[in-house]
Image (cartoon, coloured by chain):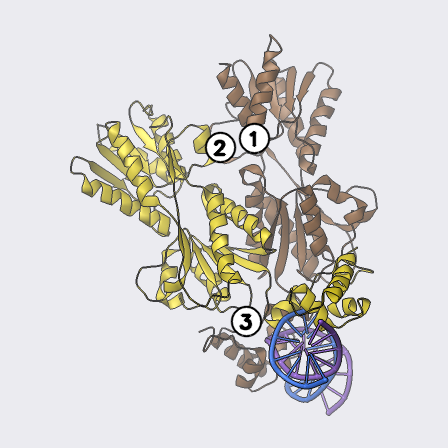
Chain colours: A brown, B yellow, C blue, D purple
DNA sequence: CTGAAAGCGCTTACAG
DNA sequence: CTGAAAGCGCTTACAG
């Protein structure tokens, strides 16, 4: 159906078959209104019949749309990226586009990947998922390819990234609500497991926690740094508990995976949750749901969708006005057994 | 570094700067041995200096390597695809290639995506992750693009897909070992939660279970069909329990997610695991690990790597001999609390 | 409304 | 060992 003898048909052959010229076939394919209804029908017919699909390389080379969107991300635990990609793919599919997924192996690698696409000419647009914060430096800000930041916001300063669309999570409000809830349960003394702050989200959650504590004199908090994964979180919490006799009222974690480590540490010390101490995560992974851990639900598929929408909005409108759009994703607290 | 004023440099400009011709630059870039050492050095220098990167569309149009590998998959629960992609990206990275990830929304969509790439001319190669079994029909077997099957094997019959490389899991051995283990624990009466059998893996696990029961006269089994997700599994098990007084010795599930549903159902009926009944899953998701559920570990990242290796092996050797390679991935039982 | 022609940036015979 | 030229399959001014 798609081909005769193995080789794909070219536009020229379609033109022959439809008794017209390449130009006209091209026009029909791109919905150019300057084609008579009759011709359009005839061409569309032949195109359909032979399952013709224009060669994307030729199209890309010519400078037109390529139907490819680059997605750059770092592989993160528990499938945030995976779900975001799913959401993007859902939207891309509606716009007849494909995702070119590039996984960065390190912050440096992330920047390299971005530089590779930034000049343009490879893809129609580029989505940067949770980039390392160093990407926001001016050094790498200049770019020609339309780009959208996902789970990250460009700095307010007007330099560099000023005109980039972005999708961000309402981390601050989520942390505030979470804290309020814990305080209402009687928590006064907290331990916060802090992310490295390399990504915007981690950084913002850290800031939000600090700010909340600072605003409330009656509260106090210890901070545990360097707990990136389940194992390191477990060890660090064990170490923390070693040093003191009493218990804090709650462990607040910048993400779920770290919270799992905390739970493991507590379990091994026979400390009961939530009776002796409360624990909260952030992300709402499937595991969190299954073990009924209190956390903040992050609608990752939706985030992917919204990000892709922003990109296609930009790609498909010919507006030259460069207003930067910023979508804020609301997060909801999942109040469960661990708190 | 990468550009002067926003536009990427072309090969022609590099040639000018290096005082030579496009042809020679092209030769240097593709490691053609027919270039003098001196010229090569001079060109390489300029290329390096300007961070020149050849336009992939031009290259692709010309029929050369595009550095893009299509990966077609269906979004499956619990990140199997995500991990597989990670593994593939690891390997692709070493070969300076990118992944074009296409998520199928249904079996039909999967076939459509495949047909889109099968003719060739879009990507260097195509990886089919856990395709629906209908893809193995002869109808869609003919293709010009190099392809590899992941978590799926082409039928033994010499038709259609005969010459396709593939990576498969040793499902049969895993099920055998798992059953042996349960039998040694005294289990005689089983309930099997069956996959739809739409993918090769699900189908093969179903077959392996059936075969095991058939081979052992002392064992008996009920089969619950149609439990695809946690919710449906829970409901179906609840329904199953409703109908009878006694309990089976073990619930064997074709994957972890379904096993979670079983655990929920048992929990809600206050049936203790493993004291009253044993439960096993398949996949070894992070949740399974965390809640200490017995399951079969599927090394999904490794699977991705092996699949990609097979593809690049084919792409980079000029062998015309079409031997199909088949990599079998060994699985290991994770014997934990739930059994 | 339609077609002939130029050109996107490469690679690869073909000639030297 | 090197370069001039053709051509991959499109799109888009340019002319009619």
- Badge 3 local density, few (<14 within 10 Å), some, or many (20+)? some
- The chain letter under disc 1 is A
The quadrant of the rendering that contains the C terminus of chain B is top left
- The chain letter under disc 3 is A
- Asked whether, in this view, residue B248 is left or right of residue A138, the answer is left
x, y percentage for residue A261?
54, 25
Q: Is residue D6 above or below residue B184?
A: below
The quadrant of the rendering that contains the N terminus of chain B is bottom right
Res B29 seen here: yes
x, y percentage for residue A12?
58, 81
- Asked whether, in this view, residue A235 is left or right of residue A214, the answer is left
x, y percentage for residue B40?
73, 64
- The chain letter under disc 2 is A
Q: Is residue A14 above or below residue B8?
A: below
| Among the 4 quarters of the image, the one containing residue A106 | top right
Residue at position x 61%, y 14% in the image: A248
Label 3 residue SS? loop
Between the residue at mark 1 and the residue at mark 3, the CA separation in whole angstroms equals 45 Å
Disc 3 designates what residue? Answer: A53
Looking at marks 2 and 1 on the same chain, the residue that comes earlier in the sequence is marked by 1
Res A28 seen here: no
Q: Are marks 2 and 3 on the same chain?
A: yes
Disc 2 designates what residue? Answer: A287
Residue at position x 51%, y 56% in the image: B71
Please report contact status of discs 2 and 1: CB closer than 8 Å, yes or no: yes
Query: For residue A293, which numbered disc appears in the image?
Result: none
Label 1 residue SS? helix
| Among the 4 quarters of the image, the one containing residue B193 | top left
Disc 1 designates what residue? Answer: A256
x, y percentage for residue A40?
58, 79
User: Residue reaching furthest top?
Assistant: A245
């Amino acid at each position: 159906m798609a081909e005769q003898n193995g080789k794909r048909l070219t536009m020229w052959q379609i033109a022959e078959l439809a008794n017209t010229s390449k130009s006209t076939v091209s026009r029909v394919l791109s919905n150019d209104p300057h084609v008579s209804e009759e011709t359009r029908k005839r061409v569309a017919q032949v195109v359909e019949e032979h399952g013709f699909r224009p060669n994307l390389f030729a199209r890309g080379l010519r400078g037109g749309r390529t139907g490819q969107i680059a997605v750059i991300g770092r592989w993160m635990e528990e499938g945030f990226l995976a779900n975001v990609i799913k959401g993007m793919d859902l939207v891309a599919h509606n716009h007849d586009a494909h995702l070119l997924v590039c996984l960065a192996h390190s912050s440096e690698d992330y920047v390299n990947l971005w530089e590779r696409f930034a000049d343009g000419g490879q893809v129609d647009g580029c989505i940067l998922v949770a980039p390392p914060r160093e990407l926001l430096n001016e050094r790498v800000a200049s770019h020609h390819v339309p780009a959208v930041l996902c789970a990250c916001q460009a700095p307010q300063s007007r330099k560099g990234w000023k005109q980039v669309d972005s999708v961000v999570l309402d981390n601050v409000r989520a942390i505030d609500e979470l804290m309020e809830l814990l305080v209402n349960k009687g928590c006064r003394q907290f331990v916060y497991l802090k992310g490295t702050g390399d990504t915007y989200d981690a950084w913002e959650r850290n800031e939000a926690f600090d700010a909340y504590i600072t605003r409330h004199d009656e509260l106090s908090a210890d901070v545990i740094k360097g707990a990136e994964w389940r194992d390191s979180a477990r060890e660090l919490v064990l170490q923390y508990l070693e040093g003191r006799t009493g218990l804090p009222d709650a462990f607040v974690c910048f993400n779920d995976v770290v919270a799992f480590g905390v739970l493991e540490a507590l379990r091994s010390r026979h400390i009961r949750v939530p009776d002796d101490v409360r624990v909260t995560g952030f992300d709402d992974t499937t595991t969190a749901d299954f073990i009924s851990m209190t956390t903040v639900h992050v609608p990752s598929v939706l985030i992917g969708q919204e990000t892709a929408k922003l990109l296609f909005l930009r790609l498909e409108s010919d507006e030259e006005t460069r207003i930067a759009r910023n979508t804020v994703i609301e997060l909801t607290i999942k109040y469960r057994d661990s708190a």
